Amino acid sequence: MSVRAHQQPVLGILGGMGPLATADFITKMTQALPAKCDRDHIPWITLSQPGIPDRSESIQSGSDAPLPYLTSGVAWLAAQGVSQIVIPCNTSHFWYEQMQAASAVPILHIADAAVNELKKTSLPEAGPVALLATRGTVRTGIYAGRLKSAGYRVVELDDEEQTTLDNIIHCVKAGDVAPARERMQRLEAALHGKGVKMAILGCTELPLAHDRRQPALPVIDTSLALAKEALRRLGYLELEKAGE
């Protein structure tokens, strides 16, 4: 399949949650394209809103404080003439229905993209799969429901493991990637020792902490899964055949 040479369609990206994770998403999307020159690449518009209230804390406290920022952000992107919208922040998808209602163009759901990517792996449907995510994302159930519907057994982190993961996410957001990577390696190894076969990196900071060169555990990178699904939907990558 030849890569598009025309500067259409345009992808809208609602980012800033956090900024480093958004930059990582854009890099992965760019690298996923089999482009030979500038004209082969996808045009995109990014609205970075780092001032959005913390999504996980809001969910845990029962607050909808992020919602006005999210709905105005996707509405603004839709008004720019984009054909699809992606949001490289897992926790924000708690408000997916409200965001979609505010947007005249479709928004890709990051959990759908991730679970679809998991189905393409050789992991037996029995799993088990560990969800590595913010406490807010875990509470929403956006992954647990999809994974169970697809036949996978979900392994929940205990409180000590979740606290370690919270610290890893915080380190990445603060720009301290090296210590985050060391802690992530130890956590993944511990989960592997408990019989976990695969992990969903259900926070877009976590791929930056995962050591791809020496992985302690196979993972689904939700940023990469979202990028690839967006490229497929817009015609920049071929759609895989069923079962591939």
Image (tube, grey):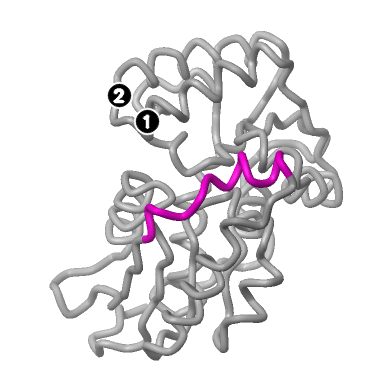
Three-letter amino acid code at the position of disc 1: Val
Q: In the picture shown, does residue 150 fall above or below 206?
A: below
**Foreground of the two, 3 or 73:** 73
Instruction: Say whether residue 54 is magenta.
Output: yes
Residue 226: where, in percent of width, then height? 50, 58
- Judge whether 48 appears above or below 82 on screen: above
Tally of numbered discs? 2
Kindly identify which residue carries mark 2. 176
Residue that carries the numbered disc 1 in the rendered image? 172
Locate residue 23, reporting x and y percent: 30, 51
| The magenta segment | 49-61
Which of the numbered marks, if any, corresponds to residue 76? none
Magenta-colored stretch includes residue 188 = no
- Cβ atoms under marks 2 and 1 closer than 8 Å: yes
The image quadrant that residue 40 belongs to is bottom left
Quick check: 111 above or below 128?
below
Quarter of the picture holding the C terminus: bottom right
Alpha carbons under labels 2 and 1: distance apart: 5 Å
Residue at 34 percent across and 25 percent down: it is: 213
Q: Position of residue 162 (x, y in %)?
A: 64, 21
* Residue visible at 71% across and 39% down in the picture: 60
